[in-house]
Amino acid sequence: MNDNSQFRQLREQLNQVLIGQQAAIDHVLMAMLTGGHVLLEGVPGLGKTLLVRALARSMDGRQARIQFTPDLMPSDVSGHSLYDMSTQQFRIRRGPVFTNLLLADEINRAPAKTQAALLEVMQEGQVTIDGKALAVPKPFMVLATQNPIEQEGTYPLPEAELDRFLFKILLATPGLEDEVAIVRGVTAPGTSDRDYLEQVSVVASLEDWMRWREAVSALPVDERVMDYAVRLVQASRSFPSLQRGAGPRASINLVRTARARAWLASRDFVLPDDVKALFLPVLRHRVLLSPEAELEGHTPDQVLLKVLETVPSPRMDT
């Protein structure tokens, strides 16, 4: 049974800073607990940067930000070697990926070659510069953002890179009460954005982060739940409204994140409902709609909900 007061305090603190985004925060925390990366999609001003800064501050970790632009080079992301005149030797200048939490802001504004600079570090936790493999700090997590409205001057993310993201999270616009609370907190007399972040305190260490990961990975998963996750993903590959379904990495991530969801709920067992709840964020960026579905105005989420209906959930009472 999970009874980790530090983690509950971390979760509560993030919810106090990023008001009205509880679902997004929980998904980011699940990614953190499973060693995954997150693609955040939402209009500007919903607190994506604030979330990364608050999480890094809560965990006493390092954070870095890369503003992706059309002229950004791969070496601006990973680093490069340069010749040092004083020593007459080449030395390596490490890029911003050498951190714990990396915010890749507006990742779709850079061309594919620059986007691909993140592939190796997201998958293997290392960067190769001049043939030398350099490990990034542990733990390491990428939170990338993209604006769903502006398409001019953007480059679609390659399928290989999309598949590296554990979740694609759609940030919702806050409701009236939440937005009033946000405005009240930020515009209070004598308060600046920096002051707003000052309320975030260190509640856990990076070692705690790694310990939580180990606890989540040790959670048992019933064979029926695992079979259900795989059958759901396989159903996406033959569904008429999908031109391309999700691959095996989706099945793996469904099981891993279902463990994290159970851990967040202080359970030591995984339910089919955990798999159901994470089906959309795990698969929405891994499937491709058929031309007919696009013409009819369907979204990946709408189609995936229909996929869910085609696969019966296992009974867990015996």
Image (cartoon, rainbow, N blue to C red):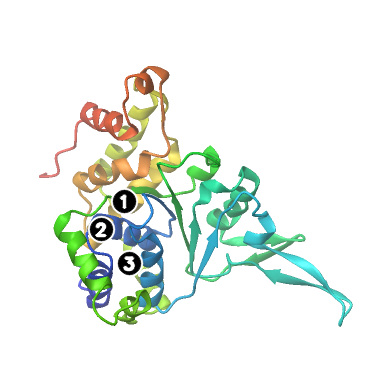
Looking at the image, the residue that sits furthest to the front is 189
Q: Is tag 2's residue or tag 3's residue first in the polypeptide sequence?
A: 2
Q: Badge 1 is on which residue?
A: 171
Q: Report crowding for label 3: few under 14, some 14 to 19, many 20 or more residues within 10 A (C-alpha).
A: some
Looking at the image, the residue that sits furthest to the left is 317
Residue at position x 41%, y 73% from top?
A: 56
Residue 3: x and y in percent read: 20, 72
Q: Amino acid at mark 3?
A: Ala
For marks 2 and 3, give the CA distance.
25 Å
Q: Amino acid at mark 1?
A: Leu
Quadrant including the C terminus: top left
Residue 10 shows up from this direction: yes
In the rendered image, the vertical position of residue 186 relative to residue 41, given as above or below = below
Q: Amino acid at mark 2?
A: Gln
Q: Which mark is residue 215?
A: 3
Q: Is tag 3's residue or tag 1's residue first in the polypeptide sequence?
A: 1
Residue at position x 54%, y 71% from top?
A: 137
Q: Which mark is residue 21?
A: 2
Residue at position x 23%, y 42% from top?
A: 276
Residue 156: x and y in percent read: 53, 39
In the rendered image, the vertical position of residue 58 relative to residue 134, given as above or below = below
Secondary-structure class at tag 1 = loop
Q: Is mark 2 in CB contact (under 8 Å) with mark 1?
A: yes
Residue 273: x and y in percent read: 19, 45
Q: Report crowding for label 2: few under 14, some 14 to 19, many 20 or more residues within 10 A (C-alpha).
A: many
Q: Quadrant of residue 37?
A: bottom left
Say which of marks 3 and 1 sits in front: 1
